Image (spheres, rainbow, N blue to C red):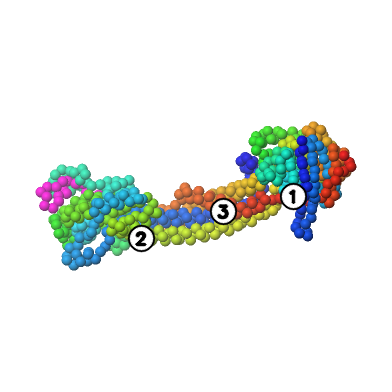
Amino acid sequence: MSVIVARGLTRTFGTGEAARRAVDDVSLSVEAGEVVLIFGPSGCGKSTLLALIGGLDRAFSGSLSLFGQEVAQLSDAALSRLRGEKIGFVFQAFHLLGHLSVIDNVMAPALFSSHDRHEPEVRARASQMLERVGLADRASSSPAELSGGQRQRVAIARALLHQPSLLLCDEPTGNLDRKTGEQIIELFAELHAELGTTIVIVTHEERISRLADRTLDMVDGKLAIGGAA
Amino acid sequence: MRLRALGKMVRGELARTRGPLVTAGFGIAVGVASLVFFLALGLGARKVLLGDVFPIDQVELEPKKTSAGLISLLGGVHEPAGIDPQSVEQLKALPGVKEVFPKLRFRFPSMARGGKEILGTEIGTHEMVGDGIDPALVAGTVTGFRDPLETPGAECSSNADCKGPQYCEKPSKAPRGQCSDPVPALVSRYLVELFDHGVAPAHGLPPVAETLIGRAQGVAFELTLGNSLLGVARHGEQRKARVKVVGISPKAIDLGVTLPVEVVRRWNREYAGEAAATRYSSVVVRVGGAGDTGHLIDAAAGLGLVPHDTRARDVSVLISGVLALLVLVASVILAVAAANIAHTFRMLVAERQHEIGLYRALGASGRDIRLWLSSLALVIGTLAGLGGALVARGGALVADWRAAKDLPDFPFKPESFFVFPWWLWLLAIGFASVFALLGAFGPARRAANTDPAQALTRDR
């Protein structure tokens, strides 16, 4: 089953002569359980592509289907629900909320879910996720007290709270040193093996390619089959 | 978004942004405090002026005055038009009319003398004016105001035949009368104030207001019927009746005494004939609300009746005008406060762009974001409204305390210049909430429309 199907996906910024195609006529299909790596230099449009296939950016042309649903036809509420329930995001900048504790950050997706009615259950699940990423003892810490690698682990735990079918990672090791980056890559490999989650990673770091079932190269907004898979 | 999660987000934001939000709420609180203070003052003024001085929920109607009165006066006899019982029934049937109370004016000359119990010396008037009202009009506010002959005493031929304070109520030319308790009388607050601030100082007499209220049951005077300084009655013989004041009432005639209508009916019949006993001098019509007064006056005009006193309407219009002005001032303060709220929320949304983008990525819809910020505004508005209303209440208490302490006694001086009905509290909170929501509307909408992809990459 295809988790993502994109046909002629295009995202243009600006108008007239200043118009620039960040994503240019991209066609892509990702099957359930696949780990797909989109590789390319900074500014090639890979983060924009990730925002499109994560339903964060709807100003595209072409067609995009997520879990069999046409994104263009979904209401904002329906797309938000789809994001909350089936998609997890891991960002390069972690995007943790500084005013919340580590465990509250992990629990944040539950604020917008209609399923998570019982806070103790959510808290227990968040604790499990923190344990899984090796940060059970830092649950009550502030994100400011954590190292970069630890913050990214918290972000991964947050992304996994709802056990998403699709994990979208934007330069997940971009802000980490080599050793910590390796640990995060290892964590992704373990999670994929355990949960079978579909993972799409955009990066410019070649070392991540060992994780991927398939590698795609992106240059100037266009996608091409890579050679690392 | 679930209510509990919404509450958690709002609480979190209140804790995080306490300073700016308190500042924004302060403006709302000041506006609401002004609004509530002015409104409560206006309601207080309305209560005293339209409740005690010029009651607005009731209108006294009387026959339209015509030049026929002057012609008859030239002939030596004046017969007022009066209101027949049929017109009274027609008034009762009008929409908005709750009750109709006919009044009979004294249609005979009279004089009064008494007051020794409270003044130490007897005082009197050579021309006594009075009227009779239905005791139901003052039911619940005055006790003992009823026709004393409802329970007639023993037969008598003179006061000597009666016991205690009773006197012999013996109509002109009747061979025998009946012992009667003194006729209960009501006087107006206006009359008491006039006496205390006008007559008493001129004659070196003590003010009576407090005494009269406290010793109302004991204050008696003698009413001479059928004779006065200006002349004698056309029918009947001069005689005396005993009257006692049983209370001060806004339903009493301004200058004179008000007695039970059946007593006046008997005396009018005795001294002025049957027409004077059955044709009412005026009717007091009690309506459902001030809004019904206008319709009543229009309908009464069709029956040839006009309001006895239009001051109530004039005062009502004046109070409404002043209130509207004060409410406008308070509304301007609230509008400025709403602008302040808008500014604070714009800043908040600008600062939270990244966070809003993250929430969208985590599953929040635009509606969730709008709901979050609107709820925050609602909580600020509610708290500010409640705070403002409490400040206004406190201000009112201080103002009342200062007024009681510093202001000299004056007619109709109330115990409190303010009225705080329950709906004023709701209005305060409602107004504050609405203005806070109005202020937050634009920023909340903008936040809901935040492009999450851009927001999340903005700081990179």
Residues tagged 1 and 3 counted as in contact (Cβ below 8 A): no
Q: Is B440 drawn above or below residue A225 in the view shown? A: below
Label 3 residue SS: helix
Mark carried by residue B311: 2
Amino acid type assigned to the residue bearing label 1 in the image:
Ser
Q: How many angstroms separate mark 1 from mark 3 (CA)?
A: 41 Å
Q: CA distance from mark 2 to mark 3?
A: 37 Å
Mark 1 or 3, closer to the camera: 1
Residue B173: in magenta span: yes
Q: Which residues are magenta?
A: B168-186
Q: Which residue is mark 3?
A: B435
Q: Which residue is mark 1?
A: A61
The chain identifier of the residue carrying mark 3 reads: B
Looking at the rendered image, the disc whose residue lies closer to the viewer, 2 or 1, is: 1
Disc 1 packing (10 Å; few <14; some 14–19; many ≥20): some
Give the Cα separation between the discs numbered 2 and 1: 74 Å
**Residue occupying image coordinates x 38% and y 61%:** B314
B318 w.r.t. B18: above or below:
below
Query: Residue extending furthest top?
Result: A194
Residue B131 lies, in percent from the top left, at: 25, 55
Residue plotted at (53% across, 54% down):
B32
**Residue found at x 53% / y 50%:** B430
| Res B424 label | none
